[in-house]
Image (spheres, rainbow, N blue to C red):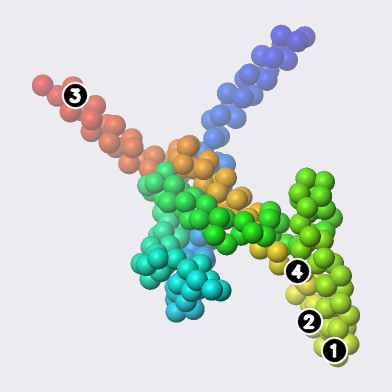
C-alpha cells in the first residue's frame, strides 16, 4: 500500500511537471500590468517624480536623477511588455528585481513590512515585529471616520470601499521581487513565450551547423 502510494505520487509529480509553463506564464501576466503601470505613472508625472528623485530633504536625493528616472521608466515599461511576450525574460526580470530591491531599501524599509496599516498583524503587534506607527493607526483611522461621518455625503465617500491607513512598507515590493526571482531562475516557461521558440530555433541552427560537412 505504501509503495503504491509512493508510485502514485511520483507519477502525479511527473504529470504536473508537464504543466510547469502555466505558473510561469501566470506570473508574467500578473507582473506585466503592475510594472507597466508603474513606469507609465512615472512617465506621466515625470517632473514631480524627478523632483522626488533629486531632492535630498523630502525625496530620495539620488545622483543623476534624470538619467536614473529615465532608466527606471524604460525598465518598468519595456520590461513589463517583455514579460508579456516572454522575451529576454531572465535579463528583464533581473533588471526589474534590482528596481524592487532599490525601492525596498530607499523608500519602504523605514516603514516595516506592511503595505496597509493593520494593527492585528503579527508583523506589527510585536509577535514577530513591533511597528508602533501601525499600532497607532486604528485610533487615527477611527477619528478620521468620526469626522467624515459628519459629512452629508459620507455614504458616497465610502462607496468605493472603506478607508485605510497606508503604511507603505516593503510588502508589495518584496512580493514582486520574489516573483521576479522565480522568473530569473526558471525563465518564461515553455510553449507560450518567445524565449522558448527562439531557443529552439537557435538550438536547431547550432545542431545543423555541427552536423554540416
Q: Which residue is mark 1?
A: 151
Pointers 2 and 1 in contact (C-beta within 8 Å): yes
Q: Which residue is mark 4?
A: 165
Mark 3 and mark 2: Cα distance apart in space = 69 Å
Would you call the spot at circle 2 few (<14 residues within 10 Å), some (14-19), or many (20 or more)?
some
Q: Which residue is mark 3?
A: 210
Task: Identify the mark nearer the N-term, 3 or 2.
Answer: 2
Mark 4 and mark 1: Cα distance apart in space = 20 Å
Above or below residue 152? Residue 4 is: above
Element class at badge 3: helix
Q: Nearer the viewer, mark 4 or mark 3?
A: 4
- Quarter of the image holding residue 144? bottom right
Q: How many marks?
A: 4
Task: Identify the mark nearer the N-term, 1 or 3.
Answer: 1
Pointers 1 and 3 in contact (C-beta within 8 Å): no
What's the residue at 51%, 67% (across, down)?
A: 60
Task: Identify the mark nearer the N-term, 4 or 3.
Answer: 4
Q: On the rendered image, what quadrant is the N terminus found in? A: top right
Q: Nearer the viewer, mark 3 or mark 2?
A: 2
User: Horizontal and vertical percent for residue 74?
Assistant: 39, 63
Q: Residue furthest left?
A: 213
What's the residue at 17%, 28% (across, down)?
A: 209
Q: Which residue is mark 2?
A: 157
Task: Identify the mark nearer the N-term, 4 or 1.
Answer: 1
Above or below residue 136? Residue 147 is: below
Q: Nearer the viewer, mark 4 or mark 2?
A: 4
Pointers 4 and 2 in contact (C-beta within 8 Å): no
What's the residue at 54%, 73% (across, down)?
A: 57
Amino acid at each position: 500500500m505504501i509503495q503504491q502510494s509512493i508510485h502514485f505520487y511520483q507519477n502525479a509529480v511527473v504529470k504536473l511537471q508537464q504543466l510547469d509553463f502555466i505558473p510561469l506564464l501566470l506570473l508574467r501576466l500578473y507582473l506585466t500590468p503592475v510594472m507597466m503601470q508603474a513606469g507609465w505613472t512615472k512617465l506621466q508625472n515625470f517632473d514631480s517624480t524627478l523632483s522626488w528623485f533629486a531632492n535630498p530633504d523630502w525625496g530620495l536625493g539620488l545622483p543623476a536623477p534624470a538619467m536614473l528616472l529615465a532608466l527606471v521608466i524604460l525598465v518598468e515599461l519595456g520590461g513589463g511588455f517583455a514579460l508579456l511576450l516572454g522575451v529576454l525574460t531572465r535579463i528583464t526580470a533581473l533588471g526589474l528585481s534590482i528596481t524592487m530591491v532599490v525601492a525596498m531599501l530607499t523608500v519602504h524599509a523605514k516603514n516595516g513590512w506592511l503595505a496597509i496599516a493593520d494593527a492585528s498583524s503579527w508583523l506589527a503587534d510585536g509577535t514577530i515585529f513591533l511597528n508602533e506607527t501601525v499600532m497607532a493607526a486604528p485610533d487615527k483611522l477611527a477619528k478620521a471616520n468620526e469626522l467624515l461621518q459628519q459629512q452629508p455625503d459620507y455614504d458616497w465617500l465610502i462607496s468605493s470601499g472603506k478607508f485605510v491607513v497606508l503604511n507603505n512598507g516593503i510588502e508589495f515590493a518584496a512580493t514582486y521581487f520574489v516573483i521576479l526571482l522565480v522568473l530569473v531562475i526558471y525563465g518564461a516557461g515553455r510553449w507560450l513565450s518567445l524565449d522558448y521558440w527562439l531557443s529552439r530555433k537557435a538550438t536547431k541552427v547550432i545542431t545543423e551547423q555541427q552536423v554540416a560537412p
